[in-house]
Image: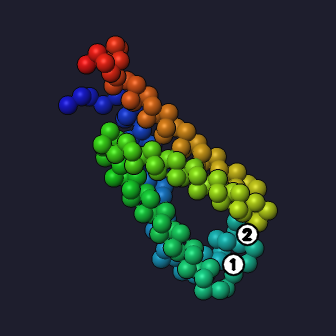
């Protein structure tokens, strides 16, 4: 078995840290509604809407974040084997963030949109660069044909 490169180790760490952060969203799935409303107001988003769909969407979105975090944790277990999944997760995260920024422009505070865009975009760029570097470090100097 070929040893793991620095890029692969760093990629594994970034995926695990991101996964751990996303898995924290499990707490919001079970969070009491008054806490949810207080957090909404504390963030400067106004009064939390009292329609049942709002609570359901907040909880289901949190559950989806946790599911993605779980997928990242699995992918981090073998960054070579799950390289395609990792690429998908990076691109999908950045794409979803960009779509949310475009569709929510004017409705959400600019700081929220920028934080989301830069964190998701930054994650995607770092992950994709590390994947590229890891692949490059595994190719012999003469290129693939020299094998």
28 vs 124, nearest the viewer: 124
Tell me: 12 left or right of 22: left
Disc 1 is placed on an element classified as loop
Q: Quadrant of the C terminus?
A: top left
Measured from the top left, where is residue 80 in percent x and y?
32, 39
Q: Quadrant of the N terminus?
A: top left
Kindly check if marks 1 and 2 are in contact, taking CB atoms under 8 A apart as contact. Answer: yes
**Looking at the picture, how far across and down is residue 132, in whole percent?**
45, 31
- Residue that numbered label 2 is attached to: 45
**In the displayed structure image, the side of residue 133 where residue 110 appears, left or right:** right
Q: Residue at x 65, y 77 (%)?
A: 37
Q: Relative to residue 42, is residue 50 depicted above or below?
A: below
Res. 35 in view: no
Name the residue furthest left: 1
- Farthest residue in the right direction? 106
Left or right of 139 on screen, residue 95: right
Closer-to-camera residue (87/1):
87
Across and down, in percent, residue 31 comes to 52, 76
- Circle 1: is it few (<14), some (14-19), or many (20+) Cα within 10 Å? some
**Residue at image coords 69%, 57%:** 101
Q: Position of residue 143 (x, y in %)?
A: 35, 18
Q: Say what secondary structure mark 2 lies in.
A: loop
Spatial CA distance of label 1 from label 2 is 8 Å
Mark 2 Cα-neighbour bin, 10 Å: few <14, some 14–19, many ≥20: few
Q: Is residue 58 above or below residue 133?
A: below
Q: Residue at x 60, y 86 (%)?
A: 52
Residue located beneath label 1 in the image: 48
């Amino acid at each position: 078995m070929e040893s793991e490169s620095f890029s692969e180790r760093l990629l594994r760490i970034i995926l695990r840290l991101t996964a751990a952060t996303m898995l924290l969203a499990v707490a919001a799935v079970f969070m009491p509604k008054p806490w949810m409303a207080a957090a909404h107001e504390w963030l400067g988003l106004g009064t939390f809407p009292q329609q049942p769909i709002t609570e359901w969407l907040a909880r289901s979105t949190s559950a989806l974040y946790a599911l993605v975090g779980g997928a990242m944790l699995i992918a981090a277990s073998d960054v070579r084997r799950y390289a395609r999944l990792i690429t998908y997760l990076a691109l999908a995260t950045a794409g979803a963030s960009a779509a949310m920024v475009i569709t929510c422009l004017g409705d959400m505070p600019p700081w929220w949109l920028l934080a989301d865009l830069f964190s998701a975009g930054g994650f995607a760029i770092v992950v994709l660069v590390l994947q590229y570097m890891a692949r490059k470090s595994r190719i012999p100097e003469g290129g693939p044909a020299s094998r």
